[in-house]
Image (cartoon, rainbow, N blue to C red):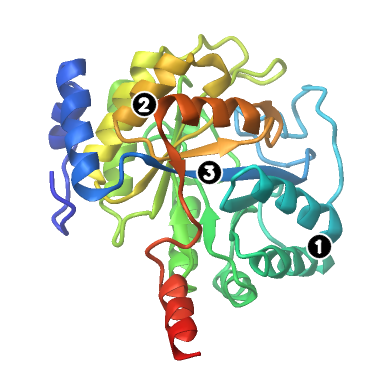
Amino acid sequence: MSDNTSALTVDEVSKVYNTPLLELIYKAATVHRMHNDPAEVQISSLISIKTGGCSEDCSYCPQAARYNTDIDVHKLMTVDQVTEAAQKAKMGGASRLCMGAAWREVRDNRDFDRVLEMVKAVNSMDMEVCCTLGMLTESQAQKLSDAGLYAYNHNLDTSAENYKSIITTRTYDDRLNTIKNVRKAKITVCSGGIIGMGESVEDRVKMLVTLANMKPRPESVPINALVPVEGTPLEDQPLVPIWDMVRMIATTRIVMPKTVVRLSAGRTQMSAEGQALCFMAGANSIFAGDKLLTTPNPDFNADKELFNTLGLTAREPFKNSERIKAKSTEILQN
């Protein structure tokens, strides 16, 4: 499949997803090499700048106030705490810092003003800055853009049809509207989903069809494996087989050839060999650091060892973006 403007159908993407696995990996690896450097992986670091107490009922999330999950609830971090975390992440090889707050939606108040200061501070460190703060209005998205926000994460999670079985406190259209507001503010979009929540293969395919048919397509698509957390409605879900993750990564790469495909939550349950298959199948981004918001994640040293074994290198920030072109022009002129 080419990265063109024609809309993909569920049947087309289902055919890709259900390709025999080794053939699927081969096809995905071929597409990956045509459009990306297969040895280059973007390293992102995700921190929770405000943890717990969320009013949403997302069935997978330990930060929902209605669930008993024993997480360490904390208020919004200070700008200094965030810049310290960003510096540590940068030293570990991260080119992007993602800041997550357990909010249903952004409110125009002092907390949002502080987040804008965080964005400005991390942006000044020559790192890509990403936020995931819940629903955004058009004016709020513009304020984040003005502060230097590079990307906004707002996952679809699953298909539109399956969505109500996972979340009832906001609609699928709410999510799509936030993504539209992010686009209007000229911020890049990071949007993907979670597998292992009891969804069908058709749900997975339909989610990818929705993402692939966005114009433009998301610059980044995270593929998460559910990490079941005690106290949440999905605590008893079985772990996702590595073959499902490889299949999902490969399908995403084929239907969105130029998009950065992130191997996200669930990596602690994957072997090095399993992760290597995901990279071969087209994953070219990971979250590094010992936590993803509130769930475990491999630390920087473990990932460095894996990168050395596989011959992978860390991607530089702002690659292929207008910002890096502008900076290069400025250097030449001076």
Mark pair 1, 2: CA separation: 38 Å
- Going by the numbered disc 2, the residue's amino acid type is Cys
Label 1 neighbour load within 10 Å: few <14, some 14-19, many 20+? some
Residue at 46% in and 20% down = 196
Q: Percent x, y for residue 53?
A: 79, 40
Point out the tag, 3 or 2, that comes first from the N-terminus. Answer: 3
Residue 278 circle label? 2
Would you place residue 333 above or below residue 32 in this image? below
Q: Percent x, y for residue 269?
A: 54, 15
Residue that badge 1 annotates: 111
Q: Quadrant of residue 265?
A: top right
Residue 57 circle label? none
Quadrant occupied by the N terminus: top left
Left or right? Give the position of 25 relative to 199: left
Would you place residue 4 above or below residue 283 in this image? below
Residue 43 circle label? 3
- Going by the numbered disc 1, the residue's amino acid type is Asp
Q: Nearer the viewer, residue 69 or 245?
A: 245
Mark pair 3, 2: CA separation: 15 Å
Q: Percent x, y for residue 10?
A: 19, 36
Q: Percent x, y for residue 274?
A: 41, 17
Mark pair 3, 1: CA separation: 27 Å
Q: Nearer the viewer, residue 98 or 67?
A: 98
